[in-house]
Amino acid sequence: MNAQHEINLIESYHTASSVTCFCNYFFLYNSPMNQSAAYRIPQTLHILTLVLMIGCFILGCVIFDDYGCGPDEGIERQTSLVNFRYTIERLQLPVPDSWTRFLSYLPDLKEYRDRYYGTALHQPLVLIEAFADFELPPVVFYRLRHFYVFLNWYAATIAFYLLLEKRFRSALPALVGWLILVLTPRFFAESFYNNKDILFAAWTIFSLYAIDRWTERETIASALIAGLILALTVNARLNGLAYYAIAVCFAFVSVLTDRKNAKAAALQIGVLTLSFLLVLILITPNLWDAPFRTFAETFQFSADHPNHSADGNLYFGNLVDASKSKSYLIVWILLTTPTIYLGLALIGGVFFVKEMVRHRLILNQFEGNYRRDALVLSVGLAPLLYIILRQVTVYNTWRHCYFAYPTIVYFAAISFSKIEKGIRSLRRQKLRRATAFAAAFALAAVLGNNIAWIARNHPYQFAYFAPIVRARAESFSGDYWGIATRQLLEAIVTRDPSPWIQVNHLYTQTGSINRGNLADPDRARLDLSYEISDDTDYILFSRDEKTLDLEAFPGFEVWHEIRVDGALVGAVLKRE
């Protein structure tokens, strides 16, 4: 059975199971003749959730190798290796000669251009390579990296479910929120290869859970754990520092609003801060010498980061500097997120504001769900607004702001919970059943539509656009990382038996790295070049920030193409 069939079977089961349970839940709830069945519904929901989560894990294990590689994967691996070499040399660790020989070609960390990027989350992958004496072929270590990104995201979705279940004290809205997160097309695809933005989004969820647990329990253990997770998150991306600031602010607000013991709160903040700083320095080799000065340099490096988007991002048919447009990120969120999810999130936000006004902002109450909702909103919204208003360098759609998506899904789940409670409050049983039935099939339509789209367009879910703009998809950035280049190369080696094939890969970013995903005999047949000569057989084309104009390639014709909803993702041009 191939991966496409696995997707159809497992994801179809997701929809059918969710809808059946949803209907039964409302049909049985508060029905006198079905009290025993109603009592069993929460247990049934938990069993269903466990089955779906296991199914999701199995699906990930089946399809994680279906996606191509992006250019950042090679860069991230090299940066991780540079940090690994520095760690060995700085601590004078005894290692095999084979490790030393392999690492010797790498630059010193202090002279490396990307020394300010943390790689702690990638070090387990380096260790796997090291224990294999760095002899793993590219196809293996890139597969490992894809599976590792999936594992991080998968674990984060479970943490998100637990956060929702704690918020609602009900399995149903938690399950629906989890399904929304898992079945968002672009996140579904990128959770297998985006080793920067998805990884940071995953650790944003871990940070949310840890901060919520700390502000709720206020124990030394919870402060230590929150500090550790925040350190790993900041190491992954400096933006995570905002989460530490938010956690401390929430602790202060708690003291002001609930008149808690200020000394106890100060102790908690001190433990959190100490844990955070010590772990961050420990896992960031670049901070080992003069940590505070180096940290200041890191901030400066971030502020002066090269603006790659100055070359232009395709946006409404024009090349724009994404950092100069205050609408860019918001529009991209609207374009690439299922509209119903955004609608539910907006309604959930309205409910939150209503509750906030009713409780007179934060003057009378800052505990339980109100605190939790405010925390999730702060973590998602505050950094996003800062990036937009300060015109921080961003590029390639809204991937740098994927950390905000868990907040969107969280408030969509709040909206669903309100709908659930509204249906349960209906007194007339027939009306309650009819409304539950209609709500169940509305849920089926939403999730089922996304499941069908994900299955139909596998493995190109990264090219998802909301239906309202699909006809104009080619007016916006497409496969900006050249992920589909792998499938373009596979088409060539599958259909062309020639012993020597010359391929121009100037018009995609990932020709070389995706050649590494091919079998050795096929890889040996391909000669990649950035020049178009009389010997060039094929040209690879990724529709990233450009559109295909055949007049620019005289003597070549479209031989193979990949399209999603009619919009070009990538193509192979062959000499006529």
Image: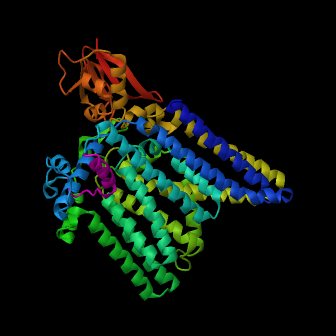
Asked whether 115 falls inside the magenta stretch, the response is yes
Task: Name the spot of residue 220 as percent of width and height, x first.
Answer: 44, 78
Above-or-below relation of 352 to 109 = below
Task: Name the spot of residue 309 as percent of width and height, x first.
Answer: 27, 45
Q: Nearer the viewer, residue 475 or 566?
A: 566
Residue at 42% across, 70% down: 225
**Count of numbered tags:** 0
The part of the chain drawn in magenta is 114-133
Which residue appears farthest toward the right when viewing the image? 33
Above-or-below relation of 477 to 239 = above
Q: Is residue 327 left or right of residue 51?
A: left
Q: Is residue 498 left or right of residue 33?
A: left
From this viewpoint, is residue 323 visible? no
Above-or-below relation of 540 to 412 = above
Q: Is residue 297 left or right of residue 57?
A: left
Q: Quadrant of residue 173?
A: bottom right
Colour scheme: rainbow
Task: Name the spot of residue 158 as percent of width and height, x first.
Answer: 52, 56
Q: Quadrant of the N terminus?
A: top right
Q: Main secondary structure of the magenta part?
A: helix
Task: Name the spot of residue 28 as percent of width and height, x first.
Answer: 78, 54
Q: Nearer the viewer, residue 382 or 90?
A: 90
From this viewpoint, is residue 281 visible? yes
Q: Quadrant of the C terminus?
A: top left
Asked whether 244 falls inside the magenta stretch, the response is no
Above-or-below relation of 253 to 447 = below
Q: Nearer the viewer, residue 22 or 229?
A: 229
Residue at 45% across, 69% down: 211
